[in-house]
Image (tube, grey):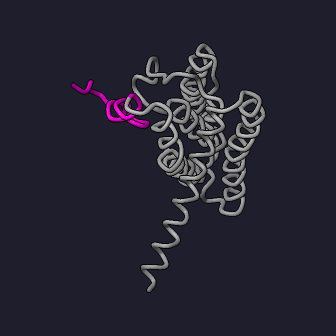
Amino acid sequence: MEFHSTLHVWLTVMGIWDRYADYVYRVATGAKRRRMLTTPVAVIIFFGLVVLFIFASLWVDKWLPFLHFGSFSWSLGLSVFILVIGFVIMFWPVIAFFRTKGTPVPFNPPPKLITTGLYAYVRNPMLLGLFIFMLGLGVLLGSLSLILIFTPLFIVLNILYLKAVEEKELEKKFGQEYLEYKKRVPMFMPRLKKRE
């Protein structure tokens, strides 16, 4: 009995995500006015979640002081290095999106699948850059909870979202081209050796 109720909940949740993927597809391929109205809302919600995760980690650090480490002579230099790498990886692909007359927001994407630049190595370089940036921020703030809890949790949630919504929507939009790209290029971690 418990298995059937768990299965029912799982199927209901997947149905909701499938409907949301269909919604994203309809907006992304629909009227320009609707895309332009939806895009800033999506940006605000996404970066609001990022800020929420950062502030949640600071709150946890305050209540569990052992998750906060002080400033070391090396931590500022290391954090700046990590932050710069994350920032560059996060914003470099934005240029490719604007060149193709689209945005990084799934509601207002470019008209063609981008597979060059950083996208030739990973399918989600902007998110990879954001994850690195959050780790750098954790080092800068001396927050073990941001480094060890909230950034990994944010990564897992993004992977689940990408699998449940974005990849389905991209398959619908670009078909076989996206499926081949997905086989060839990893989600986040670039391959050290080129695939034959």
Looking at the image, which residue sits at the far bottom?
A: 1
Q: Farthest residue toward the top? A: 99
Q: Magenta stretch: residue 178 in it?
A: yes
Q: Point out the residue furthest to the left here.
A: 196
Closest to the observer, 173 or 79: 173
Q: Nearer the viewer, residue 19 or 145?
A: 19
In this picture, is 166 found above or below 14? above
- Residue shown at 41% from the left, 31% from the top: 178
- Residue at horizontal 55 percent and vertical 39 percent from the top: 131
**Is residue 19 rendered to the left or right of residue 186?**
right
Residue 156 in the figure: left or right of residue 133 = left
The prevailing secondary structure element of the residues shown in magenta is: loop
Q: Is residue 188 above or below residue 48?
A: above
Residue 64 location (% of width, % of height): 65, 62
* Residue range corresponding to the magenta coloring: 177-196
112 or 119: which is nearer to us?
112
Query: Where's residue 48, x and y in %?
Result: 73, 44
Query: Who's the residue at 58% across and 58% down the image?
Result: 16
Q: How many marks?
A: 0
Question: In what quadrant of the picture does the N terminus appear?
Answer: bottom left
Q: Nearer the viewer, residue 56 or 96?
A: 96
Left or right, 43 with respect to 160, comes to: right
- Residue 182, how many percent across, how many down? 38, 34
Q: Is residue 151 above or below residue 67?
A: above
The verdict on residue 22 being magenta is no
- Residue 130 lies, in percent from the top left, at 58, 35
